[in-house]
């Protein structure tokens, strides 16, 4: 084999490598897109199932509240039974709102408390690297 044939072979190999790499990247991109589509469909179905579960739980809660009103109405006036159950639900809602507000205020903003200090320290190290690096 002469050097001209060797050069062609190397050139052909490099060309084949580029073509195969391109095909591989495209195939991987298609596969990733298919996986993302599949996972998105699963996530949407799961979200829908949670929505249905929440709606059914809401309806169940309403039925239980009606049951509580009807049960209390056997010993109290119906309007008073409904008033007491409604007031109890509002008290529970108020407690849940206070707990939620407390937790929300602890989590906002969603940045670590010492983030500013760490960023300032990183900037200081980058601008004065020789002072901080041991020899």
Image (cartoon, rainbow, N blue to C red):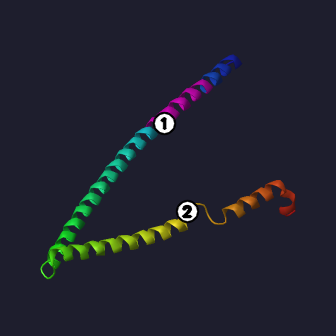
The secondary structure making up most of the magenta span is: helix
**Secondary structure category for the residue under label 1:** helix
Which residue ends up furthest to the bottom in the rendered image? 75
Circle 1 is placed at which residue position? Answer: 29
Residue in the image at 57% along x and 26% along y: 16
Residue 2: say if magenta. no
Circle 2 is placed at which residue position? Answer: 108
Which quadrant of the rendered structure holds the C terminus?
Answer: bottom right
Q: Is residue 7 above or below residue 26?
A: above
- Whole-angstrom CA distance, mark 2 to mark 1, is 37 Å
In the displayed structure, does residue 20 sit left or right of residue 76? Answer: right
Which quadrant of the rendered structure holds the N terminus?
Answer: top right
Observer-nearest of 100 and 7? 100
Residue in the image at 35% along x and 48% along y: 44
Q: Is residue 20 above or below residue 90?
A: above
Could you tell me residue 119's position as x and y percent?
Answer: 71, 59
């Amino acid at each position: 084999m002469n050097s001209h044939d060797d050069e062609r072979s190397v050139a052909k190999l490099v060309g084949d490598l580029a073509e195969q790499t391109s095909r591989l990247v495209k195939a991987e991109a298609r596969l990733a897109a298919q996986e993302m589509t599949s996972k998105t469909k699963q996530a949407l179905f799961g979200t829908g199932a949670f929505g249905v579960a929440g709606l059914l739980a809401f309806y169940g809660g309403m039925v239980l509240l009606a049951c509580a009103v009807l049960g209390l109405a056997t010993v109290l006036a119906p309007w008073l039974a409904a008033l007491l159950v409604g007031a109890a639900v509002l008290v529970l809602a108020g407690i849940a709102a206070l707990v939620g507000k407390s937790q929300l205020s602890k989590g906002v903003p969603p940045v670590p408390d010492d983030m500013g200090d760490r960023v300032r320290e990183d900037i200081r190290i980058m601008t004065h690297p020789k002072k901080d690096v041991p020899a």
